[in-house]
Amino acid sequence: MIVGALRISLRLFEGTSLKDKRRTVRRLVEGARQRFNVSAAEVEDQDLLRRATIGYSLVANDAVLIERVLANIQEYVEANGEGELYECQSDRFVL
C-alpha cells in the first residue's frame, strides 16, 4: 500500500473576510475531492486572511498513479486562479 500526500500553500488574491477565504478554500477542497477522489482539508493558516494551506492525500498500490494524481491536483489548484501557489510539497509513504 502506498500513501501519497500533497501540501499546497497559497497566497489568495481576493477576499475581505475569513468567510470569503473559507468559501474559496472549500471550492478548492471539494473540487479536488470530486474530480480526483482524494481526501482534502485546510491544514494550516486557518485564521490568516490571505494565506491558505491545503493538504491532499490518497492511497493506491501504484506509485506512478499517485504521482500523476498529485501532479494533476497541483495543476488544478494553479489553474483555478484563486491564488498564487508559493509552496508545494509532496511525499509518498510505503506501508
Image (cartoon, rainbow, N blue to C red):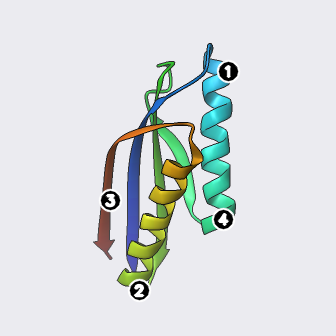
> What number is the disc on residue 35?
4
Instruction: Write down the residue under mark 2.
Output: 62
On the picture, is 54 further left or further right than 95? right
Instruction: Write down the residue under mark 1.
Output: 19
If you read the primary sequence from the N terminus, does the residue marked by circle 1 or circle 2 appear first? 1
- The span from disc 4 to disc 2 (Cα, nearest Å) is 19 Å
If you read the primary sequence from the N terminus, does the residue marked by circle 3 or circle 1 appear first? 1
Instruction: Write down the residue under mark 3.
Output: 90
Residue 56 horizontal/vertical position (percent): 48, 55
Q: Residue at x 57, y 37 (%)?
A: 82
Please tell me which residue lies in front, 50 or 43.
50
Mark 2 lies on a secondary structure that is loop
Q: Residue furthest top?
A: 16
Q: Residue at x 43, y 86 (%)?
A: 61
- The span from disc 3 to disc 1 (Cα, nearest Å) is 28 Å
Asked whether disc 3 touches disc 1, contact meaning CB atoms under 8 Å apart, the reply is: no
